[in-house]
Image (cartoon, rainbow, N blue to C red):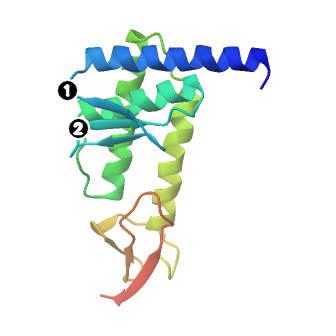
């Protein structure tokens, strides 16, 4: 690594440390900890962030997870509710960013929300006829067109499996 890259990396590391230290001081009820991905854990009252990201992405992610914490997003009961919680968290993250001189790019927000929209779109498509429907309960959907019932995986970060369980 050349001297300029080393200087930039050191400068970014200092910015990250200053940013996290300021958030820790402003929000002492939450623990901020480096990890492999950005995440809010309501059980541990902890916000995990990936320090390997560039400073802008790190700030966006930490503010987003802080917004989940501030909004007390502890659980969700449907895919659509998860999308709503994500949208609310991005709205608050953008407002929080102003306090820290971080302007979260609207394209970034919409790109992040698109991942949830795409995920929801895949899960809500009937595996028999392709009609998109709302959830029946937290783990299953039922098509109002052909009456097919299917179950979906519980995880957000896993492939959206759809397993037919029959027709009602």
Quarter holding residue 68: top left
Question: Residue, x 51% and y 66% (percent of image)?
Answer: 159
Nearer-N-terminus badge (2/1) = 1
Q: In this view, does 150 lie above or below 89?
A: below
Q: Is residue 103 visible?
A: no
Left or right of 35? Residue 142 is left
Q: Where is residue 43 in the image (x, y as percent from the top left)?
A: 21, 46
Q: Can residue 8 be seen in this view?
A: yes
Residue under label 2, please give it: 45
Question: Residue, x 52% and y 15% (percent of image)?
Answer: 14
Residue under label 1, please give it: 29
Q: What element carries label 1?
A: loop
Badge 2 vs badge 1, beta-carbon distance below 8 Å: yes
- Pick the residue in front: 9 or 152: 9
Left or right of 126? Residue 80 is left
Q: In which quarter of the image is the N terminus?
A: top right
| Mark 2 nearby-residue class (10 Å; few <14, some 14–19, many ≥20) | few
Question: Residue, x 35% and y 63% (percent of image)?
Answer: 134
Q: Where is residue 54 in the image (x, y as percent from the top left)?
A: 60, 27
The Cα atoms of the two marked residues, 2 and 1, are separated by 8 Å
Q: Where is residue 87 in the image (x, y as percent from the top left)?
A: 39, 37
Task: Identify the disc placed on residue 66.
Answer: none
Q: In this view, does 41 lie above or below 19?
A: below
**Farthest right residue?**
2
Quarter holding residue 6: top right
């Amino acid at each position: 690594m050349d001297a300029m890259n080393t200087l930039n990396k050191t400068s970014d590391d200092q910015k990250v440390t200053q940013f996290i230290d300021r958030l820790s001081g402003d929000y002492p009820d939450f623990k901020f900890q480096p990890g492999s991905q950005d995440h809010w854990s309501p059980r541990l009252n902890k916000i995990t962030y990936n320090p390997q990201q560039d400073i802008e992405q790190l700030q966006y992610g930490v503010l987003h997870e802080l917004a989940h914490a501030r909004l007390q997003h502890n659980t969700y009961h449907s895919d659509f509710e998860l999308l709503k919680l994500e949208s609310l968290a991005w709205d608050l993250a953008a407002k929080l960013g102003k306090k820290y001189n971080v302007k979260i790019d609207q394209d970034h927000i919409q790109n992040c929300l698109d991942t949830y929209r795409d995920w929801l779109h895949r899960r809500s498509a009937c595996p028999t006829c392709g009609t998109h429907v709302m959830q029946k309960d937290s783990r299953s959907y039922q098509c109002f067109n052909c009456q097919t019932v299917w179950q979906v995986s519980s995880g957000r970060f896993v492939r959206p499996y759809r397993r037919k369980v029959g027709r009602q």
